[in-house]
Image: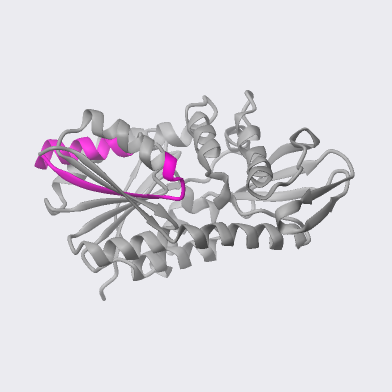
Amino acid sequence: MISRFTLVAVDSETLQTTFADDVRAGLAAHPKSLPCLYFYDHAGSLLFEKICSLPEYYPTRAERQILEAWAHELVASLHPDTVLVELGSGSAVKTAILIEAFLKKHGKLRYDPIDISRTMLEESAANLLQTHRGLEIVGVAGEYFHGLRHIKETDDRPKLVLFLGSNIGNMHRDEAASFLSQIRETTTDDDLLLIGIDLRKDRAVLEAAYDDAQGVTAQFNLNLLDRINRDFDADFDLDAFSHRAVYEDEIGRVEMHLVSERAQVVRIADLGLEVAFGEGEAMHTENSYKYSTDEIARLAERSGLTLLDQRFDAKRRFSLNLLAPNLV
């Protein structure tokens, strides 16, 4: 079978309109905030790939270790016609481990990555198709649930939906349960979900992972302001903001902020906004929640899902969780 790539754009105009609305609402709030969803334009996606290779950032290595140990066993347990679907696929470097296991077992695979970055979809597909014969890729450029609904409407084969990298941690715990419930509603009874979830651990390890010595995470955070400059003709001075990451142990989350280094007014021409910042004022950009194994079990139960299997890396820093619809 010859490998091939198709790209489908789903509701991209709505996504840009939502970005504008979220910028307006977030900068008018007290305290100010910006959703982490918008980190992942092309520049942000490339910076995140750099973060994943940093010595402080353990989640990528830990998750890769689990996948390498489990991939062939997992694939052997699935229907041979299973479609691999991924939410927020990025470069798909870790996903390639599962792709290779599928191709080795069955000789063919359809892979449907969903990502808001059209450029990243095209680049990752080109890289995968160079080395994986028998792979069909249907990239979906758009928001997760628009993408899942599109796939459900166009392909009735069983699916393994991937949500890797502990992206679920960016959501408040109630939001995470709601998100997984929505995945359940946009998939079928035959579909499974494989989700990466980071585990609670020492403060020093977590804060280093989100505030690395090379400053790449700071660049990633500041790129959100640069994106607003590019997309909406704004004049954020990136040198006038600094990156801050703090772990709140009691609630189990890392918080990222951008802190204004001086009193200033930022103009966003295309949105007709002037936004004042005080010296030392912090603008929230991301949460990353960490879970205990009991919290993971409760999350699955609240979401209408059953935890079929759970695997850890050798140091028990990270977990991969296989979930199925609760049909009882």
Residue 269 visible, this orientation: yes
Which residue lies most toward the bottom here? 328
What is the tally of numbered marks visible in this picture?
Answer: 0
Q: Which is nearer the eye, 242 or 155?
A: 155
Residue lying at 53% horizontally and 66% vertically, measured from the top left: 174
Residue lying at 80% horizontally and 36% vertically, measured from the top left: 240
**Residue 268 position within the rendered picture, expressed as x and y whole percent measured from the top left:** 75, 51
**Residue 67 position within the rendered picture, expressed as x and y whole percent measured from the top left:** 30, 38
The residue segment tinted magenta is 95-119
Residue 220 on the magenta segment: no
Q: Which is nearer the eye, 282 or 210?
A: 282
Q: How is the image coloured?
A: one colour
* In the depicted structure, whether residue 204 falls above or below residue 278: above
Residue lying at 25% horizontally and 73% vertically, measured from the top left: 327
Q: Quadrant of residue 303?
A: bottom left
**Residue 191 position within the rendered picture, expressed as x and y whole percent measured from the top left:** 24, 61
